[in-house]
């Protein structure tokens, strides 16, 4: 697990980091599918999935959800941020109807790890796997390692957003523009379109109508640029300055 996760680069986007992590978990357990998601109102949000070619896409079984939240042992473990293994033997003994339903979907083993990070509940689901760890300490080590890795990924992802995003408009900022331009020197770019734009008389608007009105103008122009250049990189590089770069135009 550590060997595979060590391939993660600091600048990798969060989704790429999680896909590499899930791939490492999938290989270690010889699983058919591993998923990572968080829940809002009991519904999965943006699951990240790695799977075998013949495995189905992510499927959130509502019957399993009822077990997760109603079974005293499972719900207690989740509330205490402990790992939970819901395997074939457990389902056959406690929930035979669910077991039959899962067998039809070829989900014979089902391990669930859950964390509460910054008041958000995250789930990592390992399905239909061959390697079953008998030692609970081994599970706990894996659980703790993934907990700190995921928390670090989330934290670094938030720092990356703060460092590369203009807070007023949500566009990329000058820092991100400078980085992208320096990175483009190493790429073979063929057709590039560039727009340099500044807002005339923004100071007059701020002086006469207040900075709130000036901010509204900046936000409105940002929205227009995103709509007009949906496939391009749009940056706010200064108070009234914008740059649009499209590296794939005809």
Image (spheres, helix red, strand yellow):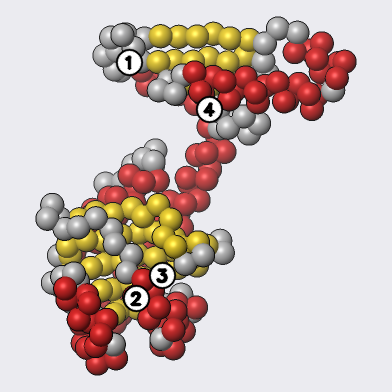
Mark 1 surroundings: few (<14), some (14-19) or many (≥20) residues within 10 A: few
- Residue drawn 48% across and 46% down? 156
Q: Earlier in the sequence, mark 4 or mark 3?
A: 3
Q: Earlier in the sequence, mark 4 or mark 2?
A: 2
User: What kind of element bears circle 2?
Assistant: helix
Whole-Å distance between the Cαs marked 1 and 4?
19 Å
Image spot of residue 50 (x, y percent): 24, 54
User: What kind of element bears circle 3?
Assistant: strand
- Asked if the residue at tag 2 contacts the one at tag 3, i.e. Cβ–Cβ closer than 8 Å, the answer is no
Would residue 231 appear left or right of 51 to someone viewing this image? right
Would residue 54 appear left or right of 165 to someone viewing this image? left
- Residue drawn 50% across and 39% down? 160
Q: Which residue is mark 3?
A: 114
1 relative to 109, above or below = above
Whole-Å distance between the Cαs marked 3 and 1?
41 Å
Q: Earlier in the sequence, mark 2 or mark 1?
A: 2
Whole-Å distance between the Cαs marked 2 and 1?
46 Å
Q: Is residue 76 visible?
A: yes
Determine which of the numbered discs, if any, sits on residue 63 in the image. 2
Q: Which residue is mark 4?
A: 172
Q: Earlier in the sequence, mark 1 or mark 4?
A: 4
Q: Using the image as rendered, state which of residue 27 and residue 198 is in the foreground.
A: 198
Q: Earlier in the sequence, mark 3 or mark 2?
A: 2
| Quadrant occupied by the C terminus | top left
In which quarter of the view is residue 216 placed?
A: top right
Q: Which residue is mark 1?
A: 248
Would residue 17 appear left or right of 158 to someone viewing this image? left
């Amino acid at each position: 697990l550590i060997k595979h996760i060590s391939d993660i680069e600091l600048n990798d986007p969060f989704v790429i980091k999680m896909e590499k992590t899930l791939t490492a978990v999938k290989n270690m357990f010889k699983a058919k599918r591993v998923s990572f998601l968080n829940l809002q109102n009991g519904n999965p949000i943006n699951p990240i999935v790695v799977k075998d070619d013949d495995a189905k896409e992510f499927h959130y079984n509502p019957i399993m959800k009822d077990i997760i939240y109603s079974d005293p042992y499972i719900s207690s473990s989740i509330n205490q941020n402990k790992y939970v293994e819901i395997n074939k033997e457990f389902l056959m003994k406690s929930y035979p109807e669910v077991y039959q339903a899962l067998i039809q979907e070829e989900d014979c083993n089902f391990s669930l790890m859950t964390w509460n990070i910054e008041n958000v509940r995250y789930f990592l689901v390992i399905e239909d796997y061959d390697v079953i760890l008998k030692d609970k300490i081994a599970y706990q080590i894996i659980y703790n390692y993934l907990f700190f890795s995921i928390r670090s990924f989330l934290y670094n992802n938030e720092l990356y957003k703060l460092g590369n995003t203009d807070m007023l408009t949500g566009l990329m900022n000058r820092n991100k523009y400078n980085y992208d331009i320096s990175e483009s020197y190493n790429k073979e770019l063929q057709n590039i379109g560039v727009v340099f734009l500044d807002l005339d008389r923004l100071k007059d608007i701020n002086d006469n109508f207040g900075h709130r009105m000036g901010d509204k103008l900046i936000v409105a122009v940002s929205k227009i640029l995103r709509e007009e250049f949906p496939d391009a990189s749009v940056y706010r590089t200064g108070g009234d300055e914008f740059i649009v770069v499209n590296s794939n135009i005809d």
